[in-house]
Image (spheres, rainbow, N blue to C red):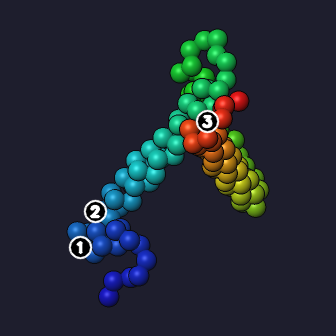
Amino acid sequence: MIPLSGGIYTYLRLGLGNIAGFICVIERFFVADCLGILIMLLTFSKYTVSILPTCGSPQLLEKMIAATTLVGLTLINSYSSKLATRVSILTTFGKVAALIVICVGGVVFISKVCAHLCWGRSLH
């Protein structure tokens, strides 16, 4: 009988042996999951640097922001999982608020353009 939990690790372990399951878990932990987090951190830092005035190399600043964010989130999660949950909820509210601002701005812009094109009024 195959256990209900374990995913691909369980199938590899049962089909090809313990070594195959172990290699799958190690690859998943060190490569796939870590690279996903790294890509998100670097994307966040690129967008953050794009709104900041920079005097020097933006690549160094991007790496510093990514490292600081990683350390900060790790410390928050290590200190309290309840605090980490609150930070996650706060960032979710921020994302939803940004989407609402974009949607409302788009509707306002389209209504101005439509009014200008349909009724000949000025955009200003």
Front residue of this view, candidates 10 and 18: 10
Is there CB contact under 8 Å for labels 1 and 3? no
| x and y, in percent, of residue 85 in the image | 71, 59
Q: Which residue in the structure is indicated by mark 1?
A: 15
Location of the N terminus (image quadrant): bottom left
Up-down: is 111 above or below 9? above
C-beta proximity under 8 Å, tags 3 and 2: no
- Residue type for callout 1: Gly
Q: Tell me where residue 4 appears, x and y as whole percent.
A: 41, 82
Mark 3, mark 2: which one is toward the viewer? 3
- Residue 32 has which mark? none
Q: Residues within 10 Å of mark 3 (few under 14, many from 20)?
A: few
How far is disc 1 from disc 3 in space, using C-alphas?
A: 71 Å
Nearer-N-terminus badge (3/2): 2
Q: CA distance from mark 3 to mark 2?
A: 70 Å
In the figure, residue 9 lies in which quadrant? bottom left
The tag earlier along the polypeptide, 1 or 2, is: 1
Residue at the disc numbered 2: 20
Numbered disc in front, either 1 or 3: 3
Q: Is residue 65 above or below residue 70?
A: above
Question: Mark 3 sits on what residue?
Answer: 120
Q: Is residue 117 above or below residue 32?
A: above
Give the image quarter of residue 116.
Answer: top right
Please state, as top left, top right, bottom left or bottom right, where the C terminus lies in the image.
top right
